[in-house]
Image (cartoon, helix red, strand yellow):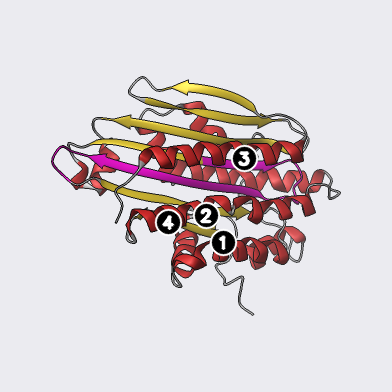
Amino acid sequence: MSSPSPAAVKAWLLDLQARIVQALEEIDGKPFLREHWERPEGGGGISRLIEEGNVFERGGVNFSHVMGKSLPPSAMAARPELAGRAWEAMGVSLVLHPRNPYAPTVHMNVRFFEATAEGQEPVWWFGGGMDLTPYYGFEDDARHFHQVCRDALAPYGSTLHDRFKKWCDEYFYIKHRKEPRGVGGIFFDDFNEAGFDMSYAMVQSVGESFLRAYLPILQRRKDASYGERERDFQSYRRGRYVEFNLVWDRGTLFGLQSGGRTEAILMSLPPIVKWRYDWHPEPGSPEARLYTDFLVHKDWLAS
């Protein structure tokens, strides 16, 4: 079993960020901004952001590598064995909000964490996943996204997809609304059960599969005709995205508590959002169908 190699993981993450941004720039036609930032407590990152693009109303593909001598209290409460250890965390996290309401929002994250203490074995794990948040649902899109997720995990264990899909369904659930955020995907955290080499290969497979999972969907939907009704509903549903990220998302909480760059952490929030009091879609409408047919936990790959 190989020892953890943070340098190798960092090199791959930086390359993954660059390749994803290049592919997205080719679709949008507008370049992503590039900003390097440093964290006074240690580490830094590279933020790649687009706003008011031709396809993406807002999107970010961020790399961060932060470190410290002790973890924030919220992290140590869940993992008391990390007390007194130096730590480093690195990852690529992206969120894309297309302008077209028929093109879904997407999120992907791959990350590595290691905590060390002199004379002791390092504590490390990988985390990540991806999930799709449509405003108008299409069965073909949901099936394609889930198929790519399953294919990415298949070489590393026959049970991983079912486990990680269930984890995603449970994690990206807006508890105070009692509804899923979208149609799910895969999610995993604290993963080290297969040893470093196998765990690293698995998380690489997930990261490398993102463009295959999302770009065909985006290409199908980005030029669809829409009007004010669709934009209005998109803005309303984006409010759910904001609620989840600010109330429940562990990555947002860890980033803010560990002194990460606020602008980079909150780049996941959509630019135009609406809330209404106790609004419900008209029965039988395309908006209602999102709730009845898509914001439900189901096996999208069942034959």
The tag earlier along the polypeptide, 1 or 3, is 3
Reading the image, the residue beneath label 3 is: 19
The tag earlier along the polypeptide, 4 or 3, is 3
Image quadrant occupied by the N terminus: bottom left
Q: Main secondary structure of the magenta part?
A: strand
The correct choice, above or below, for 182 with respect to 256 in the image is below
Position of residue 171 in the picture relative to residue 294 (left or right): left
Asked if the residue at tag 3 contacts the one at tag 4, i.e. Cβ–Cβ closer than 8 Å, the answer is: no
Q: Residues within 10 Å of mark 2 (few under 14, many from 20)?
A: many
Asked if the residue at tag 1 contacts the one at tag 2, i.e. Cβ–Cβ closer than 8 Å, the answer is: yes
4 vs 2, front mark: 2
Looking at the image, which residue is at 41% across and 52% down? 200
Q: Secondary structure at mark 3?
A: helix
Q: Quadrant of residue 170?
A: bottom left
The correct choice, above or below, for 185 with respect to 277 in the image is below
1 vs 3, front mark: 3
